[in-house]
Amino acid sequence: MIRIAAVGDVHLGPEAQGRLRPALEHLPEHADVLLLAGDLTRHGTPEEARVVATEFRDVGVPVLAVLGNHDHHGDAVPEVTEALSEGGIQVLEGDGVVLPVDGHRLGVAGVKGFGGGFEGRCASAFGEPEMKAFVGHTIEIAGKLQSALGSLSCDIRVALMHYSPVPDTLHGEPLEIYPFLGAYQLGEAVDATGTHLAVHGHAHAGCERGVTPGGVRVRNVAQPVIRSAFTVYCVEA
């Protein structure tokens, strides 16, 4: 049994330093790894990223993360990534890592993801260059996720992203903004690679549980949804 703790959309800034730390003090008693599903900062500044790094430093388990749209807002992704890395947080974007857990191999691959919508109600790469670029970006990121997941040599495979791979976990959000909350191509990448669990954030008003067309569990771990410092999912190895 591998225990996976996860949370997203913590949106930390200097005034929130220490807010989550008390709940993390005994994390190893509950989990083998901690996944951060993006939107770790409010405006994507290096200063905010250093707050995040301090908050999740030395929690006793490996910490893996993807960035979210808020983390990109300040146009300082390299600096944000560096600050997180200096705090021991491994940031994934089109790549993955395999961790030993009690004699088993846990593989986690991550991407930020992007929007576009879901089958039957989605954007297409047709028409204006801007629309082609929008959908093309989603297709490119989904391809990177599929490649990263497929390359993992592991017993348990987990997909970590910020945007949702399915509409199930968006229930509660206005239908009009579904295309900006996720894309079906991410779900296709999950289904094509024998993935056991997919974790995302971003949908603050959504719901926690969903499933891909291929039957893979999807969990929305945005903090406004799980209403705790983290939640834990157990996966049989």
Image (cartoon, rainbow, N blue to C red):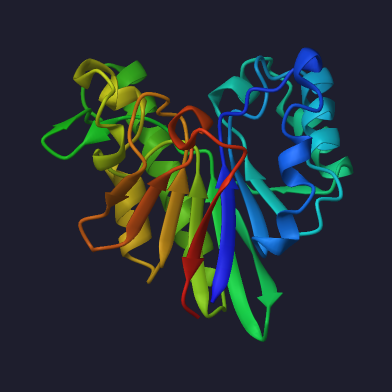
Judge left or right: residue 61 versus residue 211.
Answer: right
- 222 on left or right of 211: right
Nearer to us in this view, 117 or 141: 117
Count of numbered circles on the image: 0
Q: Quadrant of residue 14?
A: top right
Q: Residue at x 74, y 45 (%)?
A: 24
- Against 6, is 71 above or below? above
Q: Quadrant of residue 168?
A: top left
Q: Residue 175, percent across and down?
A: 20, 21
Q: Residue furthest bottom?
A: 103
Give the image location of residue 85, x and y in percent: 82, 43
Is residue 177 visible in the rendered structure shown here?
A: yes
Q: Quadrant of residue 105?
A: bottom right
Q: Position of residue 203 (x, y in %)?
A: 40, 28
Q: Residue at x 35, y 23 (%)?
A: 180
Left-right relation of 233 to 80: left
Give the answer, above or below, for where 114 lies relative to 76: below
Residue 94 visible at all:
no
- The quadrant the N terminus occupies is bottom right
Residue 183, x across and y down, in percent = 31, 37
Furthest residue in direction left, as rendered: 120
**Above/below status of 186 relative to 42:** below
